Image (cartoon, grey):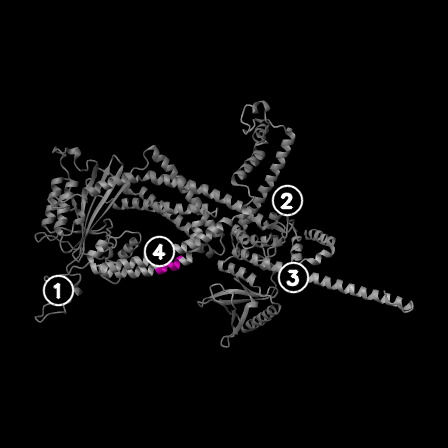
Amino acid sequence: AGGGGGRGRVDGAKARRGSAAHLFHVAQMSRWRERGRNTVMREHGIPLREGLQLLYKVHRDKFLCELVVFSAFMLCFLTIIYEAYNVPLAWEQDHGVIDLFLDEEFPGATYKKNFWEVMTYEEYWTWLKGPVFQGLYPDEWYNGDQFNDNETNYLLHNLQLVGTVQLRQMRVGPDSCTERRFLDEVDDLGRPRFDNKDGGCYPEFHLGSLVSKPSELTEPFGPPDDPTRYTYSRGLARLWGLYGFGPDDYGDGGYVVNLSRNRTAAWEMIVQMEEDRFVDVGTRAMALTFNVYNTNTRLATTARFLVEFYSSGALMPSMEIYSYRLVLYASRTDVVRGLFEVAYVALFVYQLQKEVRRLSFTHPRVRYFTRFKNLFELVYLSLHFVMIVTWARFLFADKRREYTTLAEEYENYFDLAYDYLITFTIAGINCLMSCFKLFKYLSINNRMNTLWLTLQRASYDLFIFFVGLCIIVFGFAMMGNFFFGHILRDFHNMPSSISTLTRFTLGDFNYDELSMARPRLAAIFFWLYTAVVFVVIMNMFIAIITRYFDSVHSEAKTADKWKEGMPDLTWDAVKSVRRWCRGRLRPRCNLLYVIITCKGVRKPDQMVAAFHNPLAPPKREPSGLIPSDADEAADLQTDVWEREAELETVMRECAHAAKVHKHRSLDLFEYFNHAYRETTANQYVSMEELCQLTSELQDCNHDDCVAKCLVVAYTNLKEVVLIGGVERRGGSANLARRARYQYRYTIHKVNKWGRKQQRIVAVDSKGHEMHSFDLRMNLKQALPLGLLVQVEVSHVDGRRLKLVFGEGVTLTGGGAQYKAVFQDSHDRDEFKELVLKVANNAHAEGAHGTAGHAAREAEAKRGGPAAHDAKGGAYDARFDRVLAVNSEVRHDLRILAQNVAAIGRAVTGLEARLGGGGGGGGGGAPS
């Protein structure tokens, strides 16, 4: 539209230079001519750089709004968890219980022996009658004074015992492993060689499964005088074993003995159980559970001390202690926390509906689940939902509402305490993930996003590296398991071995234990692992990270060049406030509006300046402008800001329309950003391309589409002459407009795994390419037929066709072969002839189209048009410039040839006239 005027000026200048033009190279003249090919942005579109800046503002404002919501959400979340769970106070109370029962020395021991040293039946009873009994039933002060009734049933003088103490045993029967006795193996006298003397067998504990019977004993047992004294009970709290050792689950049953709250009666019960041999070879677990409440700290504590008796003869002690609050809404602080809980749930629902809407807007749906940030958001919200559910279950539990320190019988509060613990365990995970999510809002600045960009770029190399590292560590873990597993606990099974070797990497190792276990092998194992993992593997990891970090860091310095000239966030906020004042404040109170918006001027005072610092700013005085002129100037400035705001609003609508597109939703900001990075040409995005990205109509007449509104809003704001401006030609949006399809065929594409995918293929005779679409006509692949090297047809199946491409072509899913199954042989043969025709034409014309293909393949790999259009523009723009220069050169050569021919004809005519005149004059010599 504006190219004619600019080119005319250049041609005029060249005409004035006259014969000097032939002194310059043709390419240089073409570059000068290219500079004159300007484009006026009236109905063409918008410049790529300005469109990117507008989208950045929209993107930034959206991020800031989300950041405000996220900050409010995190404020509510952190206030709730830190007010509801006082971790330092819980540690103090738990530490007191642990020190009282687990770290207390046995009476009469010659060295420090405590709960963790229990390794025999006798030591278990010593612990039960010593630290446990003395800790649960103290009866006197440190000076010998006896407790009164108000001082009994207290632990550490502050923890009131709630109900009774429960002793619970899990057992197996003597006849639950007959096959292990090997009764067929006998000696010369017919006696079993591997059987026990009493003919019994006590295996490990298990609850049974689909392929095995349970070994748990449920029948009553007792001493000979009362064989049914101890009976089996169900409906108890779930009992879990120590992770990594023995059974994981002991079920919800067991043989229960509830100790009395009276000290004397409790002692008699313990002595009676010891005399009855309550613990014997059939015992597989003994759990001691009790509940206490501290009025001073408002915390209840549930403690469980477990000793597992393995069939191998080993004993494994472990413990679980949970402190939790029961009264949660009594004080003013609790009421405030309740209000924060309501706000927290409301903000959670708001974020959840936004994520659901984002899923509903994504087309096709599967693309939503292929992006890491979407999966992260789903996990993040899911964890918050689980935390809300567990917290609600704790709040509305009957056990919590009915809890009383006056209980005389044992009450199971273990499940209640476990729900409380799980709630804040998930809360801790959410805290970590919230810190990770904060990087999402910092990523608007590329330098703040360096960490994640580095990991993203290095992800494939890191994946290969970690696969190799896992193989090496797994090999050393098996080696350590067989070397030291029979002696050292850290290597007793494969998970423990892997965990131990991982700690080795961090410097947490005990070489003395290795040396004492296997002195000859310890040095070989340790130094070999150190040399391989520390010296080689860790340095490789550092090298990978360093390489990609340098690349990302260098790109981050120049990646945001397009932001130059943009107003900062503060100035945008000031403009918004002043626009609001003009639109809302001025009609209601004009005086206040003038006071806020009018500016003063600074005038120097000569008398004052003589006695003050000459560099100090002059005193501000009232403005010397005429009020009407100042008001008119302010109105003009505000009108400009209003137009800019309208343009941003329309751009926001365009971004939303592209995101909710029913066939191919995309992020318009990422689309423009990739397009800008892949080209240095001064490009603009046409209205047709914008319409393809934002409109769902196949043939839009641009009456009221959002792309038309954007271009109109842009041209209403200003008129821009784009120097050397060229239209973007790359991308599937432009490809759909420019391609010429004679026929379309519905096929089944066969990938390298043999999976069939329904596709629509067409041949673009103009672009010498074959295009593959899905059923919604979204471009999946664009293959240059100029690089086609082989066409194969099957004689067995008349519908099959395979196209083999040369180097530089990589299809989606890998490889350079496109396999297709047509509906019938006629379609296949017709398509083959069309492909051969276009391929031959492409070879003849030399138009391989590799540049455009590379860009379109990038889009196919990403599964959407955004990246494809971005990369395609760079190569297509350069290719178009080359074609334009060649056209100009050919045009100049044709004009030069015409001028030379004209001059030759003129010289010939002149010579003829001069020669004729000379002959008529008597044969004189021609002049």
Residue 158 x/y as whole percent = 21, 36
The residue that label 2 is drawn on is 716
The alpha-carbon separation of the residues under discs 4 and 2 comes to 60 Å
In the rendered structure, find residue 538 and report the number of the disc placed on it: 4
Q: Distance between the residues labelled 3 and 1?
A: 98 Å
Residue located beneath label 1 in the image: 195
The amino acid beneath tag 4 is: Met
Mark 3 or mark 4: name the one nearer the start of the chain: 4
Quadrant where the C terminus sits is bottom right
Give residue 524's position: percent from left, percent from top. Answer: 25, 60
467 in the magenta segment: yes
What x and y, as percent, mark residue 148?
Answer: 14, 33
Q: Can residue 563 be seen in this view?
A: yes
The span shown in magenta is 462-468
Q: Of marks 4 and 2, which one's residue comes earlier in the chain?
A: 4
Q: In this view, does 192 lie to the left or right of 345?
A: left
The residue lying at 46 percent from left, 52 percent from top is 552
Mark on residue 886? 3
Q: Which mark lies nearer to you, 3 or 1?
A: 3
Residue 563 lies within the magenta run = no
Which mark's residue is nearer the viewer, 4 or 1?
Answer: 4
Sequence-first tag of 2 and 3: 2
The amino acid beneath tag 3 is Asn
Labelled pair 3, 1 in contact (Cβ < 8 Å): no
| Main secondary structure of the magenta stretch | helix
Q: What residue type is labelled 2?
A: Asn
